[in-house]
Image (cartoon, helix red, strand yellow):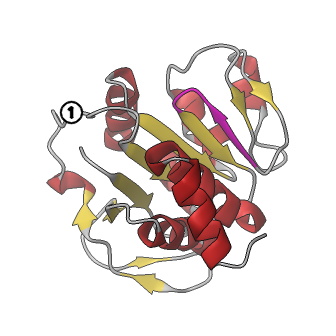
Amino acid sequence: MKGVRIFLANGFEDIEALAVCDVLRRGGVDVKLVGLERGTVVSSHGVNVQPDLCLEDLPDNEQAAGEKDVMVIPGGMPGSKTLAGCTRLIEAASRHYSQGGTLAAICAAPGLVLSQIDIPQGSKFTCFDGFQDALEAKGCIFTGEPAVRSGRIVTGRSAGHAVTFGLEILRLIKGDEAAAEVRHAMFLY
């Protein structure tokens, strides 16, 4: 895999997926939206989105090219629960992380999805209130910050912090200067 893939299931949180996609594309990152199934995906607020790819189109043996390859898991209900219950997605995320790729999740997704991945004890994370227990039980440290990068794990707190989360992913991929340029262009001083 090269670039960023944002995984969508019906009921995903609009801002957490689309703001991140927007921020990254403004930064010149190749981003693809990936649906769990073929066809239109409907957000938690009724926005219809046509993904670029379908999960079944991705090869099972796809290799991560390094930490700049990022799988993004947005929150939202019931989207996060659907993503968490998708065995193929969990296996792909586990393989991606074990091969050196980065995982990024926001809102409920860190607690529901990342908690199923073998990530290092002591990793710092953030998420929506009430979804931290599963990761804390694995020895991870909840910070409550808007966005957190801990090794090859990037997490975001909520929809209100989606742009900050996207900028943190951009910083990982393209560096501080690129993130600052996008932040400035968006008048986020």
Residue type at mark 1: give it.
Answer: Gln
Is the C terminus in the top left, top right, bottom left or bottom right quadrant? Answer: bottom right
In the image, residue 148 lies in the stretch drawn in magenta: yes
Please tell me whether mark 1 sits on a helix, a strand or a loop. loop
Magenta: predominant secondary structure element? strand
Where residue 150 appears, as percent x and y from the top left, is 63, 29
Task: Decide if residue 86 is in sight here.
Answer: no
- Residue 62's place in the image compared with 185, above or below, is above
Which residue lies at the image location 24% right of the left edge and 62% below the top edge?
54
Seen at 72% across and 21% down, the residue is 140
Residue matched to label 1: 63
108 in the magenta segment? no
Location of residue 70 by image quarter: top left
Q: Where is residue 42 shown, x and y percent of the image?
A: 47, 79
Give 80 or 66, whichever is nearer the viewer. 66
Observer-nearest of 89 and 189? 189
Residue 136, placed above or below residue 173: above
For residue 60, above or below residue 51? above
Q: Which residues are magenta?
A: 147-152
In the picture, residue 187 is in which quadrant?
bottom right
